[in-house]
Amino acid sequence: MGYQSFRELNVWKEAKSLAVAIYKLSGGTPLARDFGLKDQMQRSAVSIPSNIAEGYERKSNPEFIRYLLIAKGSLSELITQLEIAREVGLIDEPSFLPVEDQCSKVSAMLTKLIQSRRS
């Protein structure tokens, strides 16, 4: 696939960074007290780089694409959860915006990688 390890994939690096940001965000805001939403957000965030890594290790292009699509689905879940947390006042706008930007970046990277793998 061109790389020795999934750790070399820029999309994996960015997705992992997003997961770390979600953990940090959920620790220092009112979100920390909403265990259900916080847990779900962390699970969605961790699922993104995990599925990228798992798909890469399958060593099959169709399988890799399938796992990239799963990662994209987890990202959509996370975006939804972030917006809900913001709208109910568990995350303020200044905390929300940088994470939203990271989500957009990961989404664009996943879309490009999926498209390139389908060609």
Image (cartoon, rainbow, N blue to C red):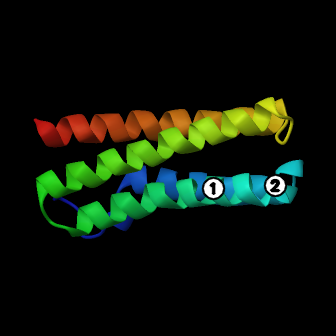
Disc 1 secondary structure class: helix
Disc 2 secondary structure class: loop
Question: Where does residue 96 sit, x and y in percent of width and height?
Answer: 74, 36
Residue at screen point 25% across, 62% down: 56
Identify residue type, mark 1.
Gln
Image vertical order of residue 102 relative to residue 70, above or below: above
Image vertical order of residue 85 relative to residue 47, above or below: above
68 with respect to 100 (left or right): left
56 with respect to 25 (left or right): left
Q: Residues within 10 Å of mark 2 (few under 14, many from 20)?
A: few
**Res 8 seen here:** no
Q: Residues within 10 Å of mark 1 (few under 14, many from 20)?
A: some
Residue at screen point 82% across, 34% down: 88
Residue at screen point 80% across, 39% down: 95
Identify residue type, mark 2.
Asp
Question: Where does residue 86 sit, x and y in percent of width and height?
Answer: 78, 34
Image vertical order of residue 115 relative to residue 64, above or below: above
**Res 62 seen here:** yes
Image vertical order of residue 78 relative to residue 24, above or below: above
Quadrant showing the N terminus: bottom left
Provide the residue designation for mark 2.
34
Residue at screen point 49% across, 38% down: 76
Frontmost residue, 8 versus 39: 39
Provide the residue designation for mark 1.
40
96 with respect to 50 (left or right): right
Distance from the alpha carbon under mark 1 to that under mark 2: 10 Å
Quadrant showing the C terminus: top left
